[in-house]
Image (tube, helix red, strand yellow):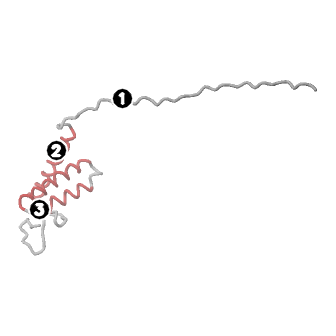
Amino acid sequence: MAAKARTSAIRIVKPQVVRVPAAPKKKGHRRHHSASGSGSEKHRAGAIGASLVLGLLDKQGTTFPTVPMLGRAGSLALACYFLRKKNPMLNHAATGFASIAAYQFGRSGSISGESVVGESTEGHATV
């Protein structure tokens, strides 16, 4: 019998890839803004503008629909709050109107411009 020829297989050794996690990225220095930055100036200007508008409306004696229990300043604050997406300055004006309404409520227990059925219409109604 004839002997079989031996065949040998060649093994190819594949290198193993070892993945090392990347080093964490360095955080950049964050800049600190002072309280008197331009953002607060815009906010202050919007709030002052709101008080100017309300003063002019009161001086001229104009009337507009108000939300019960909120009065004129509170109604304007609510309107500016809902319209703030159309103009960012309205967000600042809403703060001003809300501040005026809070001041009026704290001073007299009522908000100016609110009228309640059965009460005198002297411009103030108790809440």
- Side of 110 relative to 23 (left or right): left
What residue is drawn where x is 8% and y is 72%?
A: 119
- State the separation of the CA atoms marked 2 and 1: 36 Å
How dense is the environment of label 3, judged by Cα within 10 Å: few (below 14), some, or many (20 and up)? many
Q: Residues within 10 Å of mark 2 (few under 14, many from 20)?
A: some
**Upstream in sequence: badge 2 or badge 3:** 2
Q: Residue at x 42, y 28 (%)?
A: 23
- Secondary structure, mark 1, is loop
Query: Mark 2 sits on what residue?
Result: 44
Q: Nearer the viewer, mark 3 or mark 1?
A: 1
Q: Position of residue 25 (x, y in %)?
A: 39, 30
The answer to whether marks 2 and 1 mark residues whose Cβ atoms lie closer than 8 Å is no
The first of marks 3 and 1 along the sequence is 1
49 or 26, which is in the foreground? 26
CB under 8 Å between callouts 3 and 1? no
- Three-letter amino acid code at disc 2? Arg
Residue drawn where x is 73% and y is 24% of the image:
10
What amino acid is found at the position of numbered circle 3 in the picture?
Answer: Ile
Residue bearing mark 3: 111
Q: Which mark is residue 26?
A: 1
Rendering coords of residue 95 (x, y %) = 18, 51
| Pointer 2 with pointer 3, Cβ within 8 A | no
Q: Nearer the viewer, residue 127 or 4?
A: 4
User: In which quarter of the view is residue 69 placed?
Assistant: bottom left
Asked which quadrant contains residue 8, the reply is: top right
